[in-house]
Amino acid sequence: NASAKPPPEPSPLRKAKFFQANMRILVTGGAGFIGSHLVDRLMQNEKNEVIVVDNYFTGSKDNLKQWMGHPRFELIRHDVTEPLLIEVDQIYHLACPASPIFYKYNPVKTIKTNVIGTLNMLGLAKRVGARILLTSTSEVYGDPLIHPQDESYWGNVNPIGVRSCYDEGKRVAETLMFDYHRQHGIEIRIARIFNTYGPRMNIDDGRVVSNFIAQAIRDEPLTVQLPGTQTRSFCYVSDMVDGLIRLMEGDNTGPINIGNPGEFTMLELAENVKELINPEVQIITVENTPDDPRQRKPVITKAKSLLGWEPTIKLRDGIPLMEDDFRGRLGISRKK
Ligand code: NAD
Ligand code: UDP
Ligand code: UDP
C-alpha cells in the first residue's frame, strides 16, 4: 500500500533508552522486607537499573548490602511524604510500615506516608509517564464479613480504630491510584497483599510468624493472642515477589489479591512452628489488641487467570527457610 505512512520516528529519548536497553525502576521502601527481595529479583535482569528510596524507618541498608556499589543500583535516603524529582520508567511503591506495632507507633505519620506518599509517587508517575504499582493490603477488607475474600468485596473497616491509619490509609491510596488513572491516564497496578513471611523480616517487629520463630529459637513460650482461632493465610516472600512482577508486567490494573490461600488458625501456626523448630517449647495464650480481624483468606482466581500466578511454597516448607535466616541473625544454632 503506497499511501501508508511510514511508522513515526522514535523520539530521541526513546532511541536513547532503546540503545541502552535499560528499564529504570524505582522501588520505594526497597530497604524493607518485601522490597529488598523484590530488588534482588529485579537486579538479576541485566537490563534493569534499580533505584531504591527509603527513610529506614523499618528497613535497613543491611538488606541491600549485596548491591552497594553495583553500577546498576542506587540507594537514596528520602521520605516519600516529600516530593521526589527523578526520571524512571516504572515505580514499585511499597514505602509504608507493615507491622501493626510500627504502623501504630506514629499513626499520623503512617497515614501521611499512605496518602501524601502515594500522591507524590503518582505526581512523579504523571510527570515522567511511568507505570506505578501500589502494594495495598488485605487489611482493606478489614474484619471481613465474607469469607474467603475476593477483590469485589468492599470490606468492613473501622474508620476510627487504632488500625485505621493503615487500613484507611491504604484504601485512600487505592482511591488516589484510580483517580490518577481515570483523570490523568496514568498506568496503574494494585496488588492486595496478604500476610507475607520469609527471611529478613524484622526479628522483633511483632508479626506473628516472626514472633513465633524467634520465640521457638530462643526457647521462649509462643504467644498466641486470644482467642487463637483467628485465621491468616501466609505467603512466602519469593512467591510474593513473583506475583508483584507479573502484575507490573501484565495488562491488568487490579486490584488483584496476591496471597497464599492456605488458611491457618494462630494455634495451628504455633503448633507447626513448635513441631518444626522446637518440640519442647510451650504455647501460651495472651491478650489480643483491638480490631483484630477474625479470619482472612484470599480468593486468587484473578491472579491465576490474569497473571498465571499461584504460590508454590507451603507454610511447612517456608518456616524452615526462615528459621535458617533467624538463627544466623540471632547467633543461635540448632540443638544437636
Ligand atoms: P517493611 O516495614 O519491612 O518495609 C517498608 C519499607 O518502607 C521500610 O524499608 C521502611 O523504612 C520504608 N518506609 C516506611 N515509611 C517510609 C517513608 N515515609 N518514606 C520512605 N520509606 C518509608 O514492610 P514490608 O513487609 O516489606 O511491606 C512492604 C509493603 O507491602 C508495604 O506497603 C506494606 O503495606 C505491604 N504489605 C505487606 C504485608 C506483609 O505481610 N508483609 C501485607 C500486606 C501489605
Ligand atoms: N510530585 C513529585 N515528583 C514529581 C512530580 C510531582 O513528588 O516528579 C509531587 C508534587 O509535589 C505533588 C504531587 O506529586 O505534591 C502530586 O503532583 P501533581 O502534579 O499530580 O499535582 P499538583 O502538583 O498539581 O498538586
Ligand atoms: N498474633 C499472635 N501472637 C503474636 C503476634 C500476633 O497470636 O505474637 C496474632 C494476631 O492476634 C493476629 C495474627 O497473629 O490475629 C496476625 O498478626 P500480625 O500482626 O502478624 O498480622 P496482621 O494482624 O496484620 O494480619
Image (spheres, grey):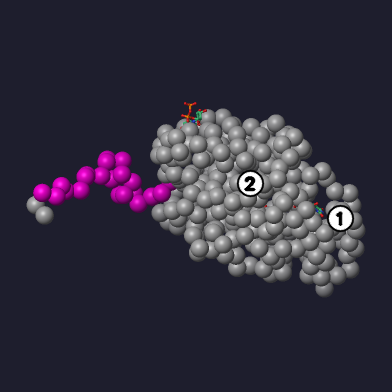
> Does the image show residue 332?
no
Q: CA distance from mark 2 to mark 1?
A: 26 Å
Residue 261's place in the image compared with 95, above or below, is below
Measuring 45% from the left and 38% from the top, which residue is drawn there? 182
Horizontal and vertical percent position of residue 331 = 77, 59
The circle on residue 314 is: none
Residue type at numbered disc 2: Trp
Q: Which span is picked out in magenta?
A: 3-24
Residue 274's place in the image compared with 136, above or below, is below
> Ligand 1 closer than 8 Å to the CB at disc 2?
no
Horizontal and vertical percent position of residue 186 = 44, 40
- Say left or right for 147 vs 37: right
Q: Earlier in the sequence, mark 2 or mark 1?
A: 2
Helix, strand, or loop for circle 2?
A: loop
Q: Is residue 17 magenta?
A: yes
Q: Examine the image and state in which quarter residue 301 appears.
A: bottom right
Residue 321's place in the image compared with 168, above or below, is below
- Say left or right for 155 vs 173: right
Q: Nearer the viewer, residue 153 or 333?
A: 153
Instruction: Categorize mark 2 by other alpha carbons within 10 Å: few (<14), some (14-19), many (20+).
Output: some
Query: CB of mark 2 within 8 Å of CB of mark 1?
Result: no
Measuring 83% from the left and 45% from the top, which residue is drawn there? 289
Residue type at numbered disc 1: Pro
Name the image quarter holding the N terminus.
bottom left
Q: Which residue is mark 2?
A: 154
Name the image quarter holding the C terminus.
bottom right
Horizontal and vertical percent position of residue 288 = 85, 48
Q: Nearer the viewer, residue 232 or 93?
A: 232
